[in-house]
């Protein structure tokens, strides 16, 4: 398994991975208003502190994760997604987070990481401190 950069050519792929409004909210929070679109992804990706990556297994793109640089030494892991329901529960999420953590440390110089998660759809955004 490896991480590759999420590029403009992958935007339509990500749109296809988000099946409905409820899933969109759980995955992306209020950042991406439904319906998610290539234009919305492009606008967000244009941020200079946003680093998005894809998990690739045997040549197939199976997951997405975003790193947001909060400061010179701090990155936040967010918008973690394993694309296919059939691929969930097989350890891809763990690999994705581990590889993204290494990327943040070695490529972005982060020595502090946090994980942005949603406890429940009706609850506010929760950040787990490093």
Image (cartoon, grey):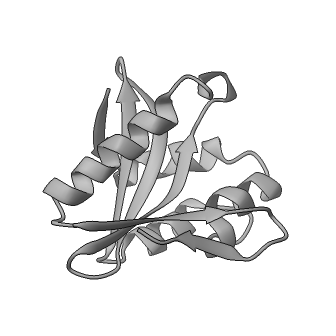
Q: Is residue 3 left or right of residue 86?
A: left
- From this viewpoint, is residue 5 visible? no
- Residue 44, given in percent of the width and then of the height, sits at 46, 73
- Residue 51, given in percent of the width and then of the height, sits at 33, 62
Q: Quadrant of residue 90?
A: top right
Q: Is 99 located above or below residue 49 in the figure? A: above
Q: Is 59 located above or below residue 56 in the figure? A: above
Q: Nearer the viewer, residue 78 or 130?
A: 130
- Residue 106, given in percent of the width and then of the height, sits at 14, 55
Please report the residue visible at 18 percent of the width from the left and 64 percent of the height from the top: 108
Please report the residue visible at 66 percent of the width from the left and 74 percent of the height from the top: 125
Q: Nearer the viewer, residue 61 or 119?
A: 119
Please report the residue visible at 25 percent of the width from the left and 58 percent of the height from the top: 104
Count the marks: how many? 0
Please report the residue visible at 63 percent of the width from the left and 72 percent of the height from the top: 126
Quadrant where the N terminus sits is top left
Residue found at the far right of this picture: 122
Q: Is residue 47 left or right of residue 22?
A: left
Q: Quadrant of residue 75?
A: bottom left
Q: Quadrant of residue 82?
A: top right
Quadrant where the C terminus sits is bottom left
Q: Nearer the viewer, residue 1 or 5?
A: 1
- From this viewpoint, is residue 54 visible? yes
């Amino acid at each position: 398994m490896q991480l590759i950069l999420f590029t403009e050519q992958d935007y339509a792929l990500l749109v296809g991975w988000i099946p409905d409004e409820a899933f969109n909210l759980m995955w992306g929070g209020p950042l991406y208003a439904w319906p998610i679109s290539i234009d919305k992804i492009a606008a967000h990706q244009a941020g200079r502190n946003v680093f998005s990556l894809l998990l690739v297994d045997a040549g197939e793109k199976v997951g997405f994760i975003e790193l947001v640089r909060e400061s010179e030494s701090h990155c936040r892991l967010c918008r973690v997604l394993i694309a296919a329901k059939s691929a969930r529960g097989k350890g891809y999420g763990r690999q994705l987070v581990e590889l993204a953590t290494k990327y943040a440390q070695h490529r972005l110089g982060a020595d502090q990481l946090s994980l942005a998660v949603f406890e429940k759809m009706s609850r506010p955004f929760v950040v787990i401190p490093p």
